Image (cartoon, rainbow, N blue to C red):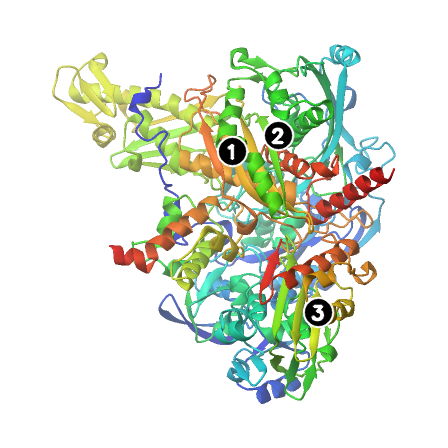
Amino acid sequence: MHSLRYLRPANVEEAVRIFNENEDASFLSGGHTLLPTLKLGLARPAALVDLTGIKSLRHITVGGDVLSIGAATCHADVASSDIVRRHIPALAGLAGSIGDRHVRNRGTIGGSVANNDPAADYPAAVLGLGATVVTDRRGLVADDFFTGLYETALESGEIVTRIDFPIPQIASYAKFRSAASRYSVAAVFISHGQSGVRVAVTGAGTNGVFRAKDLEQALSDDFRPEALADLHIDPASMSSDNVGTPEYRASLVMVMARRAMAHPGTTQSYK
Amino acid sequence: MLNERAFKAVGKPLPRKEDLRLVTGKGRFTDDFNMPGQVWASMVRSPYPHARIVAIDVADALGMPGVLGVYTGVDCARDGLQPIPHNPVPSTNFDMKLTGPGGTKVFIGSHMLLPADKARHVGEAVAMVVADTRDQAQAAAEAVAVEYEELPWVADTLAAAEPDAPRLWDELPDNVLVDSSFGDAVATDAAFARAPHVVTMTAHIGRVTGAPLEPRAALGSYDAETGRYTLYAGSGGAVRQKREMAEVLNEPPENLRVISFDVGGNFGTRNRAYVEFGLVLWASKKLGRPVKFRAERSESFLTDYQGRDLVTEVSLAIDRDGKFLAMRASNLSNVGSRCASLSPLSKGAGLITGSYDIPVATLRARAVYSCTMPTQAYRSSGRPEVTFAIERLVDKAARELGFDRLELRRRNMVRPEQMPYVNAVGSTYDSGEYEANMDKLLALADWQGIEARRADAKARGKLLGVGFANYVESSIGTPKERADVIVRPDGVEVVIGTQPAGQGHETSFAQVTADLLGVPFDNVTITLGDTDVVSAGGGTHSGRSMRHASTVLALASVEIIEKGCALAAHCLGVERDAIQFDEGVFRVADRNTSLSWFDLAGRADDKSLPESLRGGLKVRCDSEMHTPVFPNGACCCEIEVDPETGGLEITRYSTVDDVGRCINPLIVHGQTHGGIAQGVGQALWEQCYIDPGSGQPTNGSFMDYGMPRFDNMPSFKTQIVEVLSPTNPFGVKAGGEGGTTPAPAVIMSAMEDALSEFGPMDIEMPATGLKIWSAIQQGRARLAASKTA
Amino acid sequence: MALVSMTVNGSAVAREVDDNTFLAFFLRDHLGLTGTHVGCDTTQCGCCVVHVDGRSVKSCTMLAAQAQGCAVTTIEGLATGDVLHPVQRAFHLHHGLQCGYCTPGMIMAAVNLIETHDGALTEEIVREEMEGNLCRCTGYHNIVKAILAAADEMSPSHAAAE
């Protein structure tokens, strides 16, 4: 790997300052996407500003109808959290379905959300629950946060500090995993809560995570799996690679949506 | 000659001797070695599938921090380096004799460490950078400016064989380097002409890679005082690497020492020398520093020798009763850009008729060059390909002609009383009870319970499919092996030239030695992998090691027992003939005195011994054994397909494998398990895919090359059968490849069964979720169309 | 360059290393603990798994500097003198290894898995939870057996029964 400086601030303010002081710096959280990217020479930041040493970014709390998870909380902690399991079990299940157990011990929710990999799981939960991504300078609602493949509304030097999830009446997640990468070929997060029904799709769209409005409409009228029976996803909006054609992904999205509906309050992983 | 009643270790499931170091982190893999003053090599690799090297500008790279040298193919040529002498045409008396077109000598394109003329596949090393650190070498490699002239390329196997395909070698009129025919063409044609039924199939058994988990690595050093080179490099046989690298460097073999201790997986990928092995040695002399290379996994995917890639076209002529009359096959092997090995073509050639008694057959065997990484033997080289062809063809025949697929097989299997059986292309099957294997398997797999399980799966929305395949394979391999057996007061050491990469030779060879000499298993140690100690040996491939090792050890034991008797006679003051040797003890009849091996060894260095008994209690024994053996068996698996997603789960997998004498069942079962996973991997996930538009390989990591994993493999039911081979003292066949050989066929057989309601299935391996789902969609559309029509 | 200090297998260590040094290579190249292997560059194979503060991590995807002040356990630190850890012993007895390259990471992963489940494991849990470790030799069959046997031996109920 190319040479770089590793910096480990103790608080958010210091992190911002260090980031601004170092030209071509990059924030490092769990590093399970960033570090492999650097190994392959696909990015070459001059400095890494490690956010995982900041204690204030690690917490799981409930206040009112909102579940807050600190950005540097690792997937394993979300998966095993009694609070998350009690209030949004599908989210705990989702966290427990990411990568493998070692990855879950390092990867963080903030890192995943900020990276916005089009096949990542967390963006589906954030969008599917209508969460708010809170940064060191503002709160961004999910619908405004994810802007494209690996693109978010984050500005340079802006740090995700926590994610606020409105606690839904019910939520569920179903994913179909790639045999090789273990990322989702298509996955659907469905919630029914304060702001109605939300359906978020990851792994499948040409432009990354997105809301399936037709499905939301149908489920708003009738929140049962049968309500999805006659719906289809337009393959034109689906991505294509060796793992899946647009038609295959469009079909999988509907299958996963129906299975998510059939298993409320859980995460189901298929392969 | 062998007294089975004396076996105390042979046949026992003894845990392995090699485990202690490996479970405690004390293994000795190549990258674990470092030398003082060591520097690092990194390769500049071609981004093009086929391109002339116009110029290489090394100036920028040479100016970068830490860089010690940049070397190209021109430098190799200037120093007179020789091509790697792969010697790819199989040469035992029993290998199928492959020739070039029209009976000509096979043209072998020269494999220089670095090419001076052109790059012939994406990833081919065209220059090497050496620098103080690995990071520096990698950075400088990116700064080497290579000017290429892109050339037309061909990667696909069938396309490469076309007469007007882009040519890789000017010395050939096209890319076809092998074109041989076997069997009786006239009789076969006649049988086909009068046959009431002919069934035909074409299949491409695709390109895969071995993916041993230890990335390949090499550490080379040169000692100017002694003029000797040392190479640390994990391989399938250090002795072979020593001989070949000596030729490359124009050095006598004694000037090389090759060390290959623990090897992190091989499966064939390490059986041939890699250019980096020669390059680090060459650079170490030029720079006077040890030079190390370690491949990234992405480099391994690009440039480890790959496997399979065979197109087979087969036809079977069948009479009205289902008796096979004749077979015709045409096999086309893609050797890649250079011919490192023809084993994938030749090993299958002798086995095209499989486990069946087919009176006449012909085979055309061809090999082509293409702009891809060279192929090599890969786990059960050549056999899964031909097993796939015959077994899938028999399934097809059963389906099309209305036979039960098991009954059709039974009607045609080679029977025990036909052994030794000469098949229609001249291979002599040594022994086996093929139909009995089938019966054992059907019981093991609970064939009777299938329909109940199918109904159960259906109730859960799943499609259950059952696959079945018989197999027979051959184990040939390099015919020569050597063993040194040395008895010392504290134990027996065996030095031998095989090269395990997990097969447990330190354990199973010790079991054999222990019982041959009548000493405790714990007192035997096996020494491997250092050419300064191991003077000769054939390495490990083609399931040869247990058979060759037990044979040479049996020969050696006779000699050393004779030596022991002579020494014991001297020590006890009697004539040689008065000494009886039994179960590790030398004694004189009717006398109460005896000597153990270790007593004798304590006296073997005695200066007062007569000349003929001096020199220690040791022997060196060489054996040469050409006769092949034919492991065989049967295999059954069940899968459940999720028709909505194309997802799949293997729910049951059973095998019966006749391995001949099983020295260590724990190890043999383990070999079967691993072999199954590799065969299943090819059927379901693994493929080295080349983008047809760009010629770029698309699989560069475990992110895009699907592997067998904990959660996609079942537990297995494996049963060992021991029909002893008459060809060698212990009756060993082989146990390393039987798991792999029928696996692609049996998985695809199960797939076809699962999807049978949708009509004939056309899915090429690997049968990914996408392909399964698409086949179901097409099948449904066909069914819908036929209903409306 | 920075001074990185941590506890490895119970001993305090400190080394001056480049910032871009991964924990796996810190262990291998700077501490000579070559039992931790590196089999890929995309965090998939698991040959490099070690424990950091009691959790299993892929040490090829963690900078040494990120383990500053942590307690690291590697395969070399698992046995107690000549007495193998139950998981090491189970791998040996059940032939859960062939070439041995994936084995250190496999064993470290298994130890952590058993610990986090208090020994109560099923084949299904083992297969789901171990999927971040690749083995090319064994087909996983005997590794699953070994882990279940070790889990049984390490479970509190087993200890109580003795």
The answer to whether residue A217 is above or below residue B211 is below
Q: Which numbered tag is attached to residue B90?
A: none
Residue behind mark 3: A199
In this view, the residue in front, B231 or A215, is: A215
Q: Is residue B762 above or below residue A131?
A: above
Specify whether C83 is left or right of C24: left
Mark 1 lies on a secondary structure that is: loop
Q: Is residue B785 above or below residue A208?
A: above
Report which residue position mark 2 lands on: B383
Q: Report which quarter residue A91 is drawn in.
A: bottom right
Q: Which chain hosts label 3?
A: A
Q: Amino acid at mark 2?
A: Arg
Q: Is residue B87 in view from this perspective?
A: no
Residue B256 in the image: state x and y as whole percent: 52, 40
- Toward the left, the furthest residue is B592
Pick the front one: A135 or B758: B758
**What chain is tagged by disc 2?**
B
Distance from Cα at disc 1 to Cα at disc 3: 44 Å
Q: Earlier in the sequence, mark 2 or mark 1?
A: 2
Residue B519 is situated, as x and y percent measured from the top left of the image, at 27, 30
Amino acid type, callout 3: Val
- The Cα–Cα distance between marks 3 and 2, rounded to whole angstroms, is 50 Å
Judging depth in this view, the residue of B477 and A131 nearest the camera is A131
Question: What residue did someone put label 1 on?
Answer: B445
Q: Is residue B377 left or right of residue B50?
A: left
Asked if residue C60 can be seen in this view, the reply is yes
| Amino acid at pointer 1 | Ala
Circle 2/circle 1 CB separation < 8 Å: no
What is the C-alpha distance between the residues marked 2 and 1?
Answer: 23 Å
